[in-house]
Image: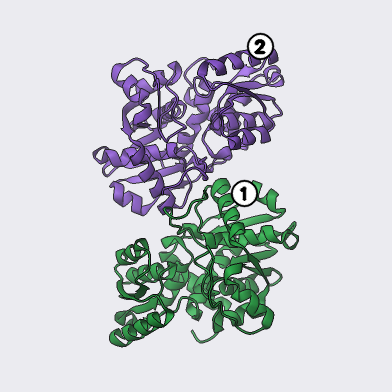
Chain colours: A green, B purple
Amino acid sequence: MENIPTLEQIQQAHHRIRPFIHRTPVMSSKLINEMAGCSIYFKCENFQKIGAFKMRGASNAVLSLPPTAISRGVATHSSGNHAQALAKAAANVGCKAYIVMPESAPVVKVKAVREYGAEIFFCDSSLQAREQTLRSVLKDTGASLIHPYDDYNIIAGQATAAFELIEEIPDLNILIAPVGGGGLLSGTCLAASYLLPEAIIIGGEPEGADDAFRSLQSGIIQPSIYPQTIADGLLTSLSERTFGIIKKHVKEIITVGDPEILVAMKLVWERMKIVIEPSAAVPLAAVFKKPEVFSGKRVGLILSGGNVDLDRNSFV
Amino acid sequence: MENIPTLEQIQQAHHRIRPFIHRTPVMSSKLINEMAGCSIYFKCENFQKIGAFKMRGASNAVLSLPPTAISRGVATHSSGNHAQALAKAAANVGCKAYIVMPESAPVVKVKAVREYGAEIFFCDSSLQAREQTLRSVLKDTGASLIHPYDDYNIIAGQATAAFELIEEIPDLNILIAPVGGGGLLSGTCLAASYLLPEAIIIGGEPEGADDAFRSLQSGIIQPSIYPQTIADGLLTSLSERTFGIIKKHVKEIITVGDPEILVAMKLVWERMKIVIEPSAAVPLAAVFKKPEVFSGKRVGLILSGGNVDLDRNSFV
């Protein structure tokens, strides 16, 4: 897709991916609403296939390829949820997936990608090594590169999460999503701009990877050079396509520190009895950080995923 | 209630408590089904009010009292989910709750009970001290004793969990629930015996508190003297009323060790993205322990609760 996805293209994406994704539930918590002073509707993408919203975008990207491209396969470099999502989305249609991963990737993530039948290429963990390995894979295989977020098919797929949320709760005043590379937030922007043009869009971002905050302030992309945060799904920086959309539609990026992220994550585990990953807790932490923005409002919040390493994450 | 609850009485209980409880969702996991070799329908009482099925029984017990008794209040001794459930069920109808708790109870549990407006009486942690303190509270206040499980109103309330599950999935071959004092398991027996008389009922029990297993083997109640297990909701032993029902309807008690309970609990957290307490993981551990019993069957499994201390429980 060459253009910013239209409403019709998002609807087509939704129709296309529906057999391959879950329609995730919308939950709320009376206690959290009381604490936050607003009504929060959590779109639970932690219950999505592969445990994260990334399944939406990857599915749409794969399913949008022409048959000849599908026969040659898809490729990306990722050690996170996008790798799993692309591997599974490809497997769903009998398409080969080539995933470049750093040798330092956690065994559990490598295992998950391999279980979906993807072929893995290991390399050093530097961005340079990853991109070089990916280039050589693309050249050798003729596979299509599926970027994790700088891709309008990906963005249209991620937009379907907010699309479903608005379908279910049609009178939201605010939508908030976490921002890393910006795929989810830009998709949220588009869905809201078409269906709920009066709604305010807010991004939640870790202080240790605050490129979207700084980029929005300055008006030009300011990548995070040494991002560091417990929200390991949000280490990436905005791209041209995501920034273009976010710049136009997002009213504010609220940044939060790791301790605030942990408090919000624990609250969701304890009170809502659902497992979310640190990245997914960032928007709730943002709500608590600036209560005046949300006070009395109906807030749609996208819980991006639930892939947390239980052996490494504890609250002790 | 003086008699073993009839189907009509369980239906009445359900009608009575409905405004005060959640109708909890039924979930399933493709991966867990593949691992277990059967189709498991998880009734998610971790999403119940106060985070456990106990809200059902406590609500029915309080709502079944005559107005004069409600005006005098209710009392129990408990440091677990029953204490919170009774405190909240009482508060729902403006009834006073007196809870006897050991001084050793975790601060977080004391706080939760107090937040529901209950009055707490502390005592030594011995059963003797608790019962003596409770007697004196009952004498001083004229409150009604609400036993956590040796009470047909409680049992009728707990039966509504299986009742809802069978309503939703009407062709189960097996129902399995954890067993501690036996309130949930005996309620499950009754609901199934009326609605699904062909279904097999199985109890899951920790090896370290295997009184139900031994009692069923010998035909007489064999309390656990020094129960010890990570499944801290299942330390109690069967009572006359619960054993009477369980003896008649339960085909088998499967016991599991703490390491097996932890594996099952972690699997549910990781794959289903929901938080359950160790006691709730016992039936799934039992399914994995004796796969031949469940092979190819449609299994209704009651996830009893999700109240786990995140600061103390980790998988590391």
Displayed quadrant of residue B235: top left
Q: Does A90 sit above or below residue B5?
A: below
Rendered location of residue A287, percent (x, y): 67, 60
Rendered location of residue A257, percent (x, y): 61, 63
Comparing marks 2 and 1, which lies closer to the viewer? Answer: 2
Rendered location of residue A252, percent (x, y): 69, 71
Residue at 55% across, 64% down: A164
Q: Does B56 sit above or below residue A124?
A: above
In this rendered view, identify the residue nearer to me: B66 or A293: A293
* C-alpha distance separating marks 2 and 1: 39 Å
> Secondary structure under badge 2?
helix
Residue at 46% across, 52% down: B273
Quadrant of the image for the N terminus of chain B? top right
Kind of residue at badge 1: Ser
Q: Judge whether residue A27 can be spotted in this image.
A: yes
Q: Does A43 sit above or below residue A95?
A: above
Q: What residue sits right under mark 2 in the picture? A: B139
In this rendered view, identify the residue nearer to me: B75 or A102: A102
Mark 2 and mark 1 in contact? Answer it, CB < 8 Å.
no
Q: What residue sits right under mark 1 in the picture? A: A29
Crowding around mark 2 (Cα neighbors within 10 Å: few <14, some 14 to 19, many 20+) is: few
In this rendered view, identify the residue nearer to me: B101 or A63: B101
Q: Chain of mark 1?
A: A
Kind of residue at badge 2: Lys
* Residue A173, numbered label: none
Displayed quadrant of residue A94: bottom left
Q: Judge whether residue A95 can be spotted in this image.
A: no
Crowding around mark 1 (Cα neighbors within 10 Å: few <14, some 14 to 19, many 20+) is: some
> Secondary structure under badge 1?
loop
Residue at 34% across, 15% down: B220
In this rendered view, identify the residue nearer to me: A175 or A75: A75
